[in-house]
Image (tube, rainbow, N blue to C red):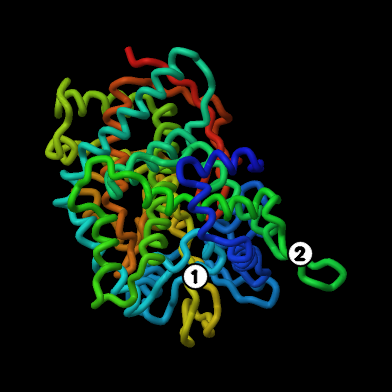
C-alpha cells in the first residue's frame, strides 16, 4: 500500500503548485467514479481472486467455443477468444461497440484513449504525425539518453549486489523515454514513487476500497488522507508538473508542441488546455506501462533462455559494434525485435480489451443487447493451439517475415486492432528493442523469483504483486 510520504515524494518538482489546480472535491468525484459498483473493474475483481484466473477462463473458453457468457450482479459480460470475434467487434462492427474506460476516468480524464466516433478522430488527428516512422529517428538520441541513465542505475546495482524490483526500474526507464522523446522534458517527478501509485491503482482488488462508503445509510466521501484516494490526488499532479518543466532541448517539433498547437488553434474547439493534460496522461501512464511490462517479462524469459540473450548481444555487435547506434542500426535488429514480439505474445500487457455494445447483435449464437460488456481476450488467442504451434513455448522465430505471413489474421493483438488500435504501438517496440540491445551489451540480469513467475490479471498483465526480483551482474 502507498503511504502518505510516498505520495508526497511522487509529486516532485512543481507538485504542490499542480495540486492546487485540483480541489479535494474534484479528487473525491474521481475516486467515486472509479469505485462505483456497476464498474466492470469492480465486478471482475471477484473473478480475479483465483490463483490463476486467466487459466480458468481459458478452460471455459475451450469448452464453450471461445464465447463465455457470464452474469455478475445483473450485468451480462461476454468473454471472447476467437479471431472471428475480434474481427467482428474491432473491425466489422467497430461502430457498434464503444470503448469502456469508466473505471479509469481518474487516470485518463477525457483522453483520446477513452473516446469513440468523430470526436476521437478529431483528437487523434493532430497527434498522428508524432507516431509516423520517420519521427522515430528524431527520437532516437533522447531514447538513448534514457537508456544510458538507466544503465548507470544498473551499474550501481551490480556493484552493490542488491536485489531490485525490475518492474519498478523498467517503469522509470519507460517514463523517462516518454518525457524526453515525446515531451522534451527531463523527468520532473520521482518515478519510483509514481510507480508505486500506479500499481496500487491498477490492482483491480484495490478498486473495491476506492468506493464511496455507506455509513448508516448515507454516502461518505473517502478522506484524502487514505492511501488509495491519495493515489489519485498524487497522479493528478504529474502531467501539470511535466508541462510546467523547462524544456530540455527546446525542440520545435515534439508530441507536446503538437498538442499545444492544437489547443491554440481556434479551428479545433474540441482541444483546450485541459485536453493537452489529458492526452499527456495516456502517454505517461498507458505508454509507460506497456513498455515497462514488456521489457520486464522479456528479461524474465531471457533468464530462462540465456542462448537467446547471447544471440541478441551478437546481433547488436554485428549491427553497430562499439559506436552509438543509428536509426538504421536499430531498424536492422530483426531478431531482437522478434524477441520483443514473442514476449508480447506470451505476456500481452493488455490481456483484455473491453467494449460496450451499443446495438443489438449476435455472437456465436448469443444475443448481444445494448449495454452488454464484451471482454476480448488477446491472452487467450495468443495461447491457443488453434492458432499457434506449441503456444506455451518461447520461440522468437514465430516472427520471421515468412512465419508472420502464415499467421491467422487477428491471432496476435498486443495493441488491439482496427482503426482504434494503439497509436504508440510501433514506438513501444522501438523503445524495447533499443533498451534490450543496449542493456544486454552491459549486463546480465538474474531472476531470483519463483519459476514459473506468477502473473496477475489486473487492468494489465503484471507480475504478481507488481514485483519481479532480479540481481544485476556486469556482462563478461
Density class for disc 1 (Cα within 10 Å; few <14, some 14-19, many ≥20) is many
Residue at image location 35% in from the left, 43% down from the top: 342
Residue at image location 46% in from the left, 46% down from the top: 14
The residue that disc 2 covers is 213
Whether residue 41 is visible: no
Q: Picture coordinates of residue 98 (x, y %)?
A: 44, 76
Q: Secondary structure at mark 2?
A: strand
Density class for disc 2 (Cα within 10 Å; few <14, some 14-19, many ≥20) is some
Residues at marks 2 and 1 touching, judged by CB atoms closer than 8 Å:
no
Mark 2 or mark 1, earlier in chain: 1
The residue that disc 1 covers is 100
Left or right: 115 with respect to 365? left
Of circles 2 and 1, which is in front? 2
* Mark 2 vs mark 1, CA separation in Å: 24 Å
Q: Picture coordinates of residue 82 (x, y %)?
A: 43, 65
Q: Is residue 193 above or below residue 37?
A: above
Q: Picture coordinates of residue 151 (x, y %)?
A: 35, 25
Q: Picture coordinates of residue 375 (x, y %)?
A: 51, 67
Residue at image location 56% in from the left, 68% down from the top: 68
Amino acid at each position: 500500500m502507498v503511504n502518505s510520504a510516498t505520495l508526497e515524494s511522487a509529486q516532485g518538482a512543481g507538485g504542490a503548485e499542480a495540486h492546487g489546480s485540483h480541489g479535494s472535491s474534484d479528487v473525491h468525484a474521481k475516486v467515486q467514479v472509479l469505485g462505483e459498483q456497476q464498474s466492470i473493474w469492480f465486478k471482475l475483481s471477484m473473478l480475479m481472486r483465483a490463483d490463476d484466473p486467466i487459466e480458468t477462463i481459458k478452460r471455459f473458453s475451450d469448452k464453450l467455443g471461445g464465447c463465455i457468457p457470464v452474469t455478475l450482479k445483473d450485468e451480462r459480460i461476454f468473454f471472447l477468444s476467437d479471431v472471428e470475434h475480434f474481427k467482428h467487434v474491432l473491425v466489422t462492427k467497430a461502430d457498434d461497440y464503444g470503448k469502456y474506460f469508466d473505471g479509469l476516468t481518474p487516470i485518463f480524464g477525457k483522453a483520446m484513449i477513452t473516446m469513440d466516433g468523430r470526436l476521437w478522430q478529431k483528437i487523434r488527428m493532430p497527434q498522428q504525425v508524432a507516431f509516423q516512422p520517420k519521427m522515430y529517428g528524431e527520437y532516437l538520441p533522447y531514447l538513448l539518453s534514457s537508456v544510458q541513465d538507466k544503465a548507470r542505475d544498473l551499474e550501481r546495482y551490480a556493484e552493490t549486489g542488491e536485489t531490485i524490483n525490475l518492474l519498478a526500474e523498467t517503469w522509470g526507464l519507460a517514463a523517462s523515454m516518454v518525457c524526453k522523446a515525446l515531451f522534451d522534458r527531463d523527468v520532473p517527478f520521482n518515478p519510483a514513487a509514481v510507480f508505486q501509485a500506479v500499481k496500487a491503482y491498477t490492482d483491480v482488488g484495490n478498486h473495491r476500497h476506492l468506493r464511496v462508503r455507506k455509513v448508516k445509510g448515507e454516502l461518505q466521501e473517502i478522506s484524502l488522507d487514505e492511501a488509495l484516494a491519495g493515489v489519485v490526488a498524487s497522479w493528478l499532479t504529474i502531467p501539470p508538473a511535466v508541462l510546467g518543466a523547462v524544456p530540455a532541448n527546446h525542440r520545435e517539433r515534439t508530441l507536446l508542441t503538437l498538442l499545444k498547437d492544437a489547443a491554440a488553434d481556434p479551428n479545433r474547439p474540441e482541444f483546450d488546455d485541459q485536453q493537452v493534460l489529458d492526452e499527456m496522461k495516456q502517454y505517461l501512464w498507458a505508454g509507460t506501462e506497456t513498455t515497462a511490462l514488456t521489457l520486464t517479462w522479456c528479461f524474465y524469459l531471457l533468464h530462462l533462455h540465456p542462448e537467446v540473450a547471447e544471440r541478441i548481444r551478437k546481433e547488436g555487435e554485428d549491427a553497430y559494434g562499439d559506436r552509438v547506434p543509428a536509426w538504421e542500426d536499430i531498424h536492422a535488429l530483426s531478431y531482437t525485435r522478434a524477441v520483443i514480439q514473442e514476449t508480447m505474445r506470451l505476456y500481452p500487457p493488455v490481456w483484455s480489451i473491453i467494449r460496450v455494445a451499443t446495438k443489438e447483435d449476435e455472437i456465436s449464437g448469443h444475443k448481444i443487447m445494448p449495454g452488454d460488456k464484451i471482454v476480448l481476450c488477446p491472452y487467450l488467442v495468443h495461447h491457443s493451439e488453434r492458432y499457434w504451434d506449441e503456444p506455451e513455448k518461447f520461440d522468437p522465430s514465430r516472427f520471421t517475415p515468412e512465419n508472420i505471413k502464415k499467421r491467422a489474421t487477428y491471432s496476435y493483438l498486443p495493441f488491439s486492432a482496427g482503426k482504434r488500435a494503439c497509436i504508440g504501438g510501433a514506438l513501444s517496440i522501438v523503445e524495447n528493442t533499443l533498451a534490450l540491445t543496449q542493456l544486454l551489451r552491459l549486463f546480465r540480469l538474474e531472476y531470483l523469483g519463483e519459476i514459473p513467475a506468477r502473473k496477475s490479471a489486473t487492468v494489465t498483465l503484471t507480475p504478481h504483486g507488481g514485483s519481479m526480483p532480479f540481481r544485476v551482474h556486469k556482462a563478461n
